[in-house]
Image (cartoon, coloured by chain):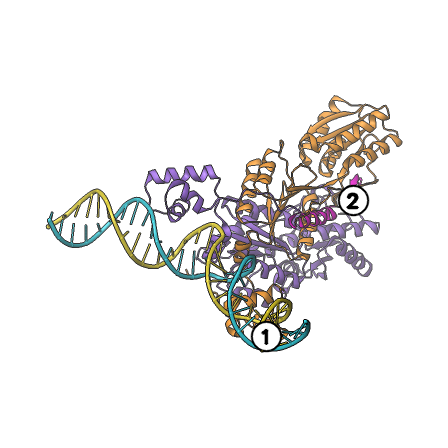
Chain colours: A purple, B orange, C yellow, D cyan
Amino acid sequence: MAAAHSAARATLIDVAAKVGVSPRTVSRVVNGETGFSEATRQRVLAAVDELDYQPNLLARGLIRNSSDTFGFVITMIDDPFFPDLALGVQTAGLEHGRTMFFAVTNRDPAVEEQVLRSMMAHSIAGAIVFSEDHDQSKLARFADRGLQMVLVDDVLDHPNVCSVSIDLYDGARQVADHLVAVGRTNPAILSGSSPPRKQRRLRGFTETMTAHGVPVISRSVDLTLEAGEVAARQLLAEHPEVDAIFAFNDLMALGAMRAVQATGRTVPDDVAIVGCDGIQLTEFVNPSITTIHIDRERLGRTAVASLLELTSGSNPEPVVLPVELVVRESA
Amino acid sequence: MAAAHSAARATLIDVAAKVGVSPRTVSRVVNGETGFSEATRQRVLAAVDELDYQPNLLARGLIRNSSDTFGFVITMIDDPFFPDLALGVQTAGLEHGRTMFFAVTNRDPAVEEQVLRSMMAHSIAGAIVFSEDHDQSKLARFADRGLQMVLVDDVLDHPNVCSVSIDLYDGARQVADHLVAVGRTNPAILSGSSPPRKQRRLRGFTETMTAHGVPVISRSVDLTLEAGEVAARQLLAEHPEVDAIFAFNDLMALGAMRAVQATGRTVPDDVAIVGCDGIQLTEFVNPSITTIHIDRERLGRTAVASLLELTSGSNPEPVVLPVELVVRESA
DNA sequence: AACGTTGACGTCAGCGTTGACGTAAGAGGG
DNA sequence: CCCTCTTACGTCAACGCTGACGTCAACGTT
C-alpha cells in the first residue's frame, strides 16, 4: 500500500542552500531576530516563499522544550455551554497563532488524567481546563510537574495555576431576589453534582432566600436534561407546594420544565422555572426560559488571555466575569 | 515573573541510567519491540514507573516525521451537529490513544488555510476535515503536499484523501415521499449555501417531488437559524400557497417554523416543517420538528476509523452512512 | 572442533531547529 | 595606525528519540 505521496517538506537547510547562507541565518530571519542585512532578509524571504518553507514545529518545540500549542479540556460537549466556550477559546487562540489540543473527559477522572498526560507528553505550553476533579489532588500534581493551567470556573492556589470564573453567587442572588419579587414562597434548587467549591450558585440562592426568610428545598443531581426531569418529577411528588425551581444549568431547567408540564401544571403560573447559562435553546422553547446569562465566548477569550500571560511568566489576576439575569416567560 | 516551576521530565537516558542499560534498550521496551529479556523488561518498567517517565512525543515525532496527533477541522460550532460529531471523533480518537488538534474555521477559507498549514507544521498524521472550500483546489493542494485527510460529507479523488458521508439523497427522498403521503402539494426547500457537490439533499428532494409530479420552490440561504427565519418569511410573502418547508438543517427549520408562526399560520396544519440532522433541539420545541436523523457520533467514529486506515497505508472505501426520517409533530 | 544462528543487548548518527559562541570585515575614535 | 566596537554572519552542539548496524555470548549442528 502506497505511503502518503508527498513532496518532502523544505527545511532550513534547503532554504539556506538556495540563498547561499547558513541555516542559522535563515532561522534568524524566520524568527525575526536581528543580525542580518536587509538584502539578505529579502533573499531569504523570497526563498522561503518559493520553497513554501514552514518551520518544523516539532523540532522547534523539542529544543525549546515547549511547543506553541495549548490544551483545552472540558467535561462534556452535549451541553451547548461548552461549544460556546470553545468558540471563544479557539478564536482567541487563533488570533495569537496558537494551535489547540482538544479533549472531552466525559467527567471521567481517568480520562482527564490520560488527556492531560498526553498533552504534557506533547510539551504543550499550557492548558485551559474545566475540571470536575473532586479533591484537586490530580490538578495539583500536574501543576507540580510543571504544567501551567488556567482553570475555568474553579480555583487552585499554585504558582502554575490561575483562574477564570463567573460570578454565579451574584447570579443566584439575582434569581432569588426575582423569584421573591414575583411572589414565590416555596422555591427549590436543583444543584449539580459538582465539587463543593463549585457550588456558589447554591450558596448564593439559599443565602439570599434565607435573608428573605424563605426556606429552600435542595436536590443534588446530574447536570443533564434527563436528570433534571427525573429530579423535578420526584421533587413535585414529595413537595407539591413547590412553586419555583432554579436549576444549575439550562438543560436541567428544560428537563424540570417538562416534568412540571407532565404533571399537568403550568409554567410559570404554577411553577416558575429558572435556568443558568443562557444557551440558545432557552429562547426557543415554550415558554421561553428565564436564565442567568453567561457570556461564554468572552469566558473562553479571557481564559486564553490569562493563559498567555501565565505562560509568558507573569502571574495573572484571577478573573470573575459578571452575569446577567435574563427574564423570559418561565419566571 | 518566575518561570513555570517544574521538575525536569525524565528521559530515556534517566531511565537507562537507573536500570543500568542503554537508552536504546529502554526505548525498545517502551515501544514494545523485541530484543530484551523478561527480567530487563521488568526492571525497565519499574524504573519507568518510578521516574514517571513519559516519552517526549515531539522528539519521537521529529524522527518519525509524523506525530501521533491528528487534526479535526470544522466550519462552525454553534450548530449542535458539530459538537456531536466532535464527540464521536474525540471518543474514537481517545480509544486509540490519539491526541487531537481542533479548529473552527467559521467558514472562512483563509482561516481554513491557516489552521491546516499550522497543523501540517506540527507534522500531524492526518486530518478529519469538514470543509466548505468551493472549488476544492485548496484541499487538493494540501493533499498534494502530503496531508492525508478524511473529508466529512464531501469527496475528492486523490490518493491522500478519503471520504465519510451521509446518504442525504435518500433522506431527502424520504422527506419528499412523506410530505406527498400527508397530502402536501406546494413544497418549498431552503437549501444551504454549500458547494453544489454537497447539494444531495436538494437533488433528492426535487427529483423525488418531480417523480410525484409536484413542483418545488427552492431558495438558497445561509445555514443559520436567523437566515432560515428571514428566508421563510420572504417565501411565504411571495408564495402564500406554500404548505411545506424542508430545510437543510434543523436550525434553519426552527427559524422557518418561527417565521410561519409569526404570520399567524399553524405548524403543521397550514405549513409542514421538516429539518435535517436530528439535533436535540428538535424534540423540545413546540411543535416538535420532523427531521432526518443523522447519527453524528457514529459519523465521527467512522471518520476516525477511516483516517487510521488511511494513515496506516491502506486506501479505505468511501463510507456512506444511512439516515432515518423521524416523524414528529411538525410534519 | 569449527561453524552458523539466535538472542540480547550496545553504538552511532541524525531528525530540524536554535542557544552559545566564534570570527572577519568595516566603522569610529584617539 | 592601532584599538575597540558593532554588524553580519558561520560553527557546533544539543534537544530526546529511534533506525541501522555492530558485537558478543550461548546454543545447536555436522
Q: Secondary structure at mark 1?
A: helix
In the picture, measured across the screen, residue B58 lies left or right of residue A269, that is left
For the residue marked with disc 2, what is the amino acid? Answer: Glu
B118 left or right, relative to B181: left
Where residue B43 is drawn, which disc sits there?
Answer: 1
Q: Which mark is residue B241?
A: none
Category of crowding for the residue at label 1, using alpha-carbon neighbours closer than 10 angstroms: few (below 14), some (14–19), many (at least 20):
some
Report whether residue B92 is seen.
yes
Residue B68 on image: x %, y %: 60, 54
Depth check, front residue: A256 or B321: B321
Q: Position of residue A299 (x, y in %)?
A: 56, 50
Q: Quadrant of residue A283?
A: top right
Q: Chain of mark 1?
A: B
Residue A207 located within the stretch drawn in magenta = no
Q: Nearer the viewer, residue A53 or B111?
A: A53
Q: From this view, report whether residue B35 is shown above or below residue A186.
A: below
Residue bearing the label numbered 2: B283
Question: Which chain's residue wears label 2?
Answer: B
Left or right: residue B298 versus residue A111 is: right
- Residue span colored magenta: B284-312
Q: Nearer the viewer, residue B7 or A303?
A: B7
What separation in Å lies between label 2 and label 1 (alpha carbons)? 57 Å
In the image, A12 versus A187, the foreground residue is A12
Q: Residue at x 69, y 51 (%)?
A: B87
Q: Is residue B306 rendered magenta in the image?
A: yes
Give the SS element for disc 2.
helix
Which mark sits nearer the N-terminus, 2 or 1?
1
The lab-note entry on whether marks 2 and 1 share a chain reads yes
Residues at circles 2 and 1 in contact by the CB criterion of under 8 Å = no
Residue type of the residue flagged with mark 1: Arg
